[in-house]
Amino acid sequence: AAHEGVKVLNMYSYNIPLQPTKIDLIREKMKLRLAFKSRSYASLLKLPIIEDPIFELFNQVCWDAIFSGQPRLLMVVAWTAIRRAIEKGVERHLPHMLVALGTLLGKKGNIKAANEIGNVALTVSENFRDNKADYSSTRFANYAGIIFY
């Protein structure tokens, strides 16, 4: 399912590889650093709130990737979604993707980044309390992910 979602995202000119290599991860990480311009994940808290249906697809692909054992794909898709958020604004599915990314980074031993991303995800999710399903699933996934640390 993740690969089908990537194919759809690529129809929107994202050029996400179906099976990212280490080189792809390095390239995408550099793109993310350039987009952040020396800021941290906390800078996402200052972005405007938007409605953008493509974030739902990003979110679904992230979770499909994590549950199908494709951590590199998760990282590339999440970083691409974060770059879109930096350009356009924060959408209600972004916190859930941040939780997936933070959980993966925590499992890989990058506890500092995982905690920062998790805290940002929780704070951003406060903007979407009216959507009980997204709000509660983001909070649940964030707290459940902490168990892995």
Image: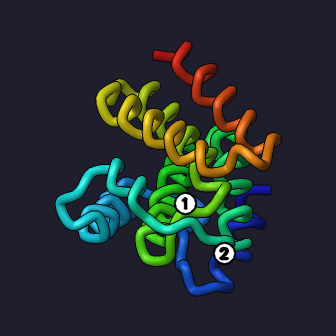
Foreground of the two, 63 or 142: 142
* Label whose residue precedes the other's in the sequence (1 or 2): 2
Tell me how the rendering is colored. Answer: rainbow
Q: How many marks?
A: 2
Instruction: Give the percent coordinates (x, y) of residue 42.
Output: 34, 48
Left or right of 3 in this view: 104: left
Residue 124 is marked as none
Residue highlighted by disc 1: 77
Q: List the single residue furthest toward the left.
A: 38
Q: Eyeballing the image, is 78 above or below 136?
A: below
Q: Residue at x 36, y 36 (%)?
A: 116
Q: CA distance from mark 1 to mark 2?
A: 9 Å
Left or right of 118 in this view: 91: right
Q: Secondary structure at mark 1?
A: helix
Left or right of 80 in this view: 139: right
Residue 9 is marked as 2
Q: Quadrant of residue 114?
A: top left
Q: Residue at x 43, y 76 (%)?
A: 87
Dots 1, 2 in contact, CB < 8 A? yes
Instruction: Give the percent coordinates (x, y) of residue 45.
Output: 42, 53
Q: Quadrant of residue 138?
A: top right
Q: Quadrant of residue 120?
A: top left
Q: Eyeballing the image, is 52 above or below 101?
A: below
Instruction: Name the image quarter holding the C terminus.
Output: top left
Q: Secondary structure at mark 2?
A: helix
Q: Amino acid at mark 1?
A: Val
Q: Amino acid at mark 2?
A: Leu
